[in-house]
Structures are given as C-alpha cells and as structure tokens.
Amino acid sequence: MSAVLAEQPTRVPVLEGWFTLDEQRPHLLGSRCTTCGTYYFPKLKGFCRNPGCNGEGFEEVPLSRTGKLWSFTNAAYQPPEPYVQVDKEAFVPFTIAAVELEKEKMIVLGQVVTGTGVEALRAGLEMELVLEPLADGKLTWKWKVAA
Amino acid sequence: MHPWGKWGRNFVEYGVKAARDALADSGVNWRDVQFVSGAATIRNGYPGQVAGATFAQALGWQGAQVNTSYAACASGSQALAAARSKILSGECEVALVIGADTTPKGFLKPQPGDRPDDPDWVRFRLGITNPTYFALYARRRIEMYGDTLEDFAQVKIKNAQHGLSNLNARYRKAFSAADVAASPMVADPLRLMDICATSDGAAAIIVSSLDYARKIGRAKAPRIAAISTVTPSFASALVEMPDIATDSAVAVPAQSFRAALPKKAYEEAGIGPEDVSVAEVYDLSTALELDWIEDLQLCARGDAARLLREGVTRVGGRLPVNPSGGLACFGEAVPAQALAQVCELTWQLRGQAGERQVAHAKVGITANQGLFGHGSSVIVKN
C-alpha cells in the first residue's frame, strides 16, 4: 500500500465520486431531484425520498462549498476500524464539524482541517470546504474556517 | 430483569432469568403464555440467533406463537408493540416480551469489510463514532441555550444518585462534578462520565388483555396506554446516526424526529405532557437527556437545564426523569433497554421502587430511539 501511496501521495480519494479533486475549489458531489429539487448527499439513484414526490430523475450537482457552522466536536479517542490510523501511537485528536448549507438546506458532517481545535470554533462561523489527506494518505473533504 | 453489567455469559441466559422473574411476578404459568415476543440484536449474522424462538426454546418449547423484532435500540418497544397488537386484536390474551444482550468492550462499531454504500461504514471510515453525534447535539445546546458543562455533569450526578439503590443497575456509585470533570475527554464537550457504557443485561414483561388480568386477580396492574414506533418524517432536521448529512429541506420543511415520537404517543393515550408524573428517557449522553425532556414537551425548547438546576427532574422534584438511574447507571444492552424503561415505570406506578420511588406516580412515559429511524415511546398509566 505504501508503494501505491508514494506514486500518488495525495490524489486517491477515500470515497470515489463523492467530491471533486480540485484542490483549489473542491466541491462535494450530490444529487438533485429534477422533479422537486431536493438535494441528496451522498448521491442518490432510483427514487426520490420526498414522500410527496414521484421523481426518479436526478442530476449530479456540486454542493455549495461554503456554509455556516451548526455544531462541532472532536474525536479525542482513536476511532475503531474502518477508520485507518497507520501509526497507532501517533493518533492526534481531530475536530469534526456539522455545517449547514444555505442553498441546499442541509447539514453535512466532515473533519475540520488539521490544526484547528474546538476552541477556535463557535456556531455560525462561515466554513469552507477543502481537501486534506487522512492518516493513511487517502484524500477526503474537510471543513475550514473561511478566510 | 437480569442485573446489568459485564457478566461474560450468553444473552439467552440473561433473557431466561428476566423471563422467569416476570412470570413469577405476574403469577402466570409459562405454559399459559400464548405469544413470545423477542427483541433482537444482530450477532453472528443472525438477529440475536432469532431471539423470540431462542428464548422460547430455552424456557421449554410449549407451542406459543412467536415473533422476533429488530429495531436497533427501539427493538424492545417494537417487540412490546407486537404483543400489544396481538392482544388488542383478540389473537391472544397473554404474552411474554423479552430483550437481552451482551456487548463487546469499547465503541460499538460496524462489521468488517469495505462497504462504501453503507452509511455506517462511511462515517466510521471518516472517524465519526457514536459519541460524535451526541457531542454535536451537546455542543449545539451550549451554543444555542447557554447550557454549561456543569449542567451536563449534574445530569450524571442526579442519575447516579437515583441508581444507588437500584439492584439491577450496573453502576451504583455517587459522582461529583469534579469526578465528571476529571474523566477523560471523549468528544468535546462530553467526557467519559457524560457518555453511557455498553452492558450485558435483560428485561422481560408479561402483558395481557384486561379480561385476563381480571381473571388472574391483576386488574389493577399498570396499563400500556400508548406505544409510538413512528419513523422520522421527511425532511429530518437533525443529522442522525449513521448518516453523514441531513435530508435537504428545499422542497419540504425540516421536522424533528425526536419530537414526533412522543407526539404520537400522547395522541394515542389521549393525554398531554402536563399529565406525566415520571419519565424514563434515553440518556446516551448527559446532554441528550436534556434534549429529550424538551422533545417530550415537558418544558419549552431550551429550558431543560433550568428544570434540572431547580431540581424538578430529580426524585423528590415535580417531574423526575430517569429514576431508575437511566443508561448512566445501566449502560446500553440494546434490545433490553426500551423494555427496562417500561419495567421501571411499572414498578414506579405500583409504588414498588423503594428509595427511588416517585411519589404519586400515575402516568409514565419513555423515550428511546433506534438506529436507522426506529422510533420508541411508551406511555404507561394506572
């Protein structure tokens, strides 16, 4: 595995097709029901989950890459598998954010960029989507306080 | 009940002990039980080795109708609902409902394997465990209502105090705010003492028609006035385990799942929150107890910490919450916990709760929630 990572150190997404790999302005990729307009993340196929909608057609859409911090916490204990920690002794607590996207009217969870602790956060802060590797080098989306 | 703890034995043994206790308490002979309703957990690829029939075999096959309910933490309520429906439809007169479990040490976690289509796998892959969700709700309370870490600690102190005399509780130890503050951080702002443990344990209940209860001289037994097992309504407003995002509320307004659960129960029982004298709620975390008090409409949104500070929710107060000691003292034994709540309400309504007895308890309500949108709220009244 380390040989593969050495060839592509930061470009392997942890979940294929869940987000764009644009390092400057990444987006989460969701679905939008072409009948009622409801958004879904992760992407949805088949049947719209709005009980008042018979929609079966979806378009893939990039979700808003900024939103307001709804709540936040951290993982002070190393999570169990399938979370991957290559060096088990090197676990550093990480921060987790729930961010409310205004246009899509939904809350999306994600880790917060390395180096930002809970003490730097408060509800309502404007957050921005970025890409950063997990401990095993696979790329994921993370939330960052918007500049 | 079988006392809760880490006993290292098979879940069937716990369930049978609880069932035998319930049979003895009711005076019903096992051979007379017409329906066995087992609450299941998933292990070894089977729902609790098919729990209803497994318990029936262990008690001695006697040809009863059988049912197994899997609804994660709401399994007990669903098994109870199945028994109640059988009775109300006239298909049977007396039923035994059982839930029992063993749990592994540490975090509850998904089965092994690579499953990016499984939301439970996805969130653990990203490092989002169960306490993450409890902590997001807890932090939200701090941000929105000004709740404090001291408030959360006081929930633990209260429930620990309630559980001191409860022989079925795993933890029977008083805690101070300093104890809670000294325990390791798990998911900020929640520390180890703010989050419930996992336990082995079992609970069982005999339910019958009113005619049958009269026949065996138990006409005054507490009655199940309502059981709510509703799912959330789209669009669900809170990010719920194991999902990584909420429903989008673009087309339909967002709605609270937790608030919907007791609403259905109140409607079915024909009572309101003002009639409730005692509540057993799902304190997976200390802060979550405060959320539930508001979802049960026992006070206005954001006011639960005030009730706690005023002593309203402790035994001796106007509206005791978790007199059993709650999950804080029991820990989670998944298919048993919703039934354990009903057991506690039954003892409270009969006036048999000893040192933790709520004075003049007439109406009790439970609240509990199962993974993947399983609802659970039961109202018991005299």
Image (cartoon, coloured by chain):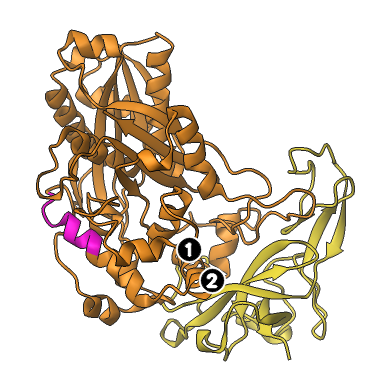
The N terminus of chain B lies in quadrant? top left
Q: Which residue in the protein does label 1 denote?
A: B302
Magenta span contains residue B161: yes
Q: Is residue B332 left or right of residue B373?
A: left
Foreground residue among A103 and B72: A103
Foreground residue among B357 and B111: B357
- The kind of residue on which mark 2 rests is Met
Q: Chain of mark 1?
A: B
Q: Secondary structure at mark 2?
A: helix
Q: Is residue B281 left or right of residue B27?
A: right
Can residue B247 be seen from the camera position used here?
yes
Q: Is residue B351 above or below residue A113?
A: above
- In the rendered image, residue B175, in percent from the top left (x then y), is placed at 19, 70
Residue numbers of the magenta segment = B158-166
- Judging by colour alone, the chain drawn in yellow in this rendered image is A
* Proximity of marks 2 and 1: CB atoms separated by less than 8 Å: yes
